[in-house]
Image (cartoon, rainbow, N blue to C red):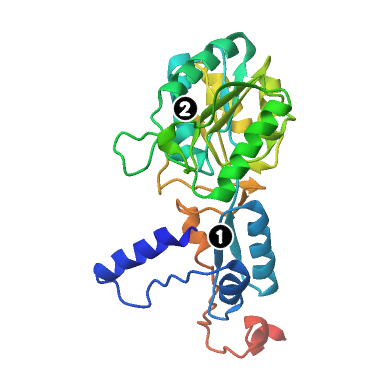
Amino acid sequence: LTPSSSLALARLLHEAGVPQGAVNVVAGYGASAGQRLIGDARAGKVVFIGSVETGRKVAAAAALAGRPSLLELGGKSANIVFADADLGKAAKAAQGAIFAAAGQSCTAGSRLLVERSVAAEITQMIAKGAGRLQLGVPTDAATEVGPINNRRQFERVTGLIDAGRREGAQCVTGGVSEDPAHKGGFFVRPTVFSDVDAQMTIAREEIFGPVLSITPFDTEEEALHLANDGAFDLAGAVWTRDVFRAHRVAKSIRAGTVWVNGYRALSVMSPFGGMRGSGFGRSSGIDVMREYTQSKSIWMETDGDATAPFGYGPDDMT
């Protein structure tokens, strides 16, 4: 399903006059096209962006073929809000973090960890904002949240919403759209769960849909434990007016990218990538130059007798 955007890019490159063969797009299944590309002797590096399960298969195939790989995989990013934060700004950013692209983003802020004393207040603010977001088709200029990409993913998202309800989380707003205009489409309304236990399925699995889990905490130590207790380490955020706490928490969150009093600011000048279940390697910043190059040592003999052992001349060996 994903090659459509790559094919569109290839068409634009062709129209711009990029020489044929400089960029090639091969659409196909991993077991056939992907495996063939990884195994080809001309492949210098394998880069994959996608699910954890497929990423591990790609890395294993690349290793067997003797190819280095770079993986950017899943995320379950923790967005931490302390009681001293600007709650209005934090709530608005939390909506953008999870509902943009209908939650179909690896850096989606799908876990909101909120200090207990303000959890009810920020939950109400986010739920109210979520209810006002315009759900619709991407071609409509008024649309703020589009549909899920395909049927299988739609069924996964709705299945996890059902799991959240079964496991005792409180669904404050959202669920499958019942608007007649959305009938037959894969539309999921911006969904907010409160009182989510850290061990619930919706708090641990990447949903890849517009579903936010809100979990309260009491101390900074508990917030960090919750943030780092999972299989993914791609991104995270901390909201506080305490500059010392901001530095402490940002340093302690185990993630490749951490924002302070903001979310989703990205630049090609800054390294991007994850750890553990979120993959390895960096896809931007100066680090990406190291990913696509290899260091090489060339020793140039400048003394007269280049054949002498260990670089010493005959007089030195007596």
Residue drawn at x 62%, y 82% is 311
Note whether 134 is above or below 116 in the view shown: below
Q: Is residue 167 above or below residue 43?
A: above
The residue under the point 63% across, 47% down is 275
What amino acid type is highlighted by mark number 2?
Answer: Gln
Mark 1 surroundings within 10 Å by alpha-carbon count, few (fewer than 14), some (14 through 19), many (20 or more)? some
Residue 32 in sight: yes
Q: Which residue is mark 1?
A: 48
- Report the residue at 56% width, 32% height from top: 211
Query: For the residues carrying marks 1 and 2, which lies nearer the camera in this image?
Result: 2
Q: Which label number is shown at residue 119?
A: none
253 to 186, vertically: above or below:
above
| Residue 203 on image: x %, y % | 67, 32
Residue 58: x and y, percent? 64, 64
Quadrant showing the C terminus: bottom right
Q: Estimate the x, y position of residue 201 in percent, counting from the top left.
A: 71, 34
Disc 1 element: strand
Q: Quadrant of residue 222?
A: top right
Residue at image position (70%, 37%) is 230
Q: Which of the pair 147/301 is nearer the observer?
A: 147
Q: Say how many tags the image has.
A: 2
Front one among 316 and 207: 207
Residue 86 in view, yes or no: no
- Residue type beneath disc 1: Phe
Identify the mark nearer the N-term, 1 or 2: 1
Q: For the residues marked 1 and 2, what is the alpha-carbon distance in whole angstroms? A: 28 Å
**Residue closest to the eye, 240 or 315:** 240
Classify residue 43 as left or right of residue 136: right
Crowding near the residue tagged with mark 2, few <14, some 14–19, many ≥20 C-alpha atoms within 10 Å: many
The residue labelled by disc 2 is 95
Q: Which element carries disc 2, helix, strand or loop? A: helix
Residues at discs 1 and 2 in contact (Cβ within 8 Å): no
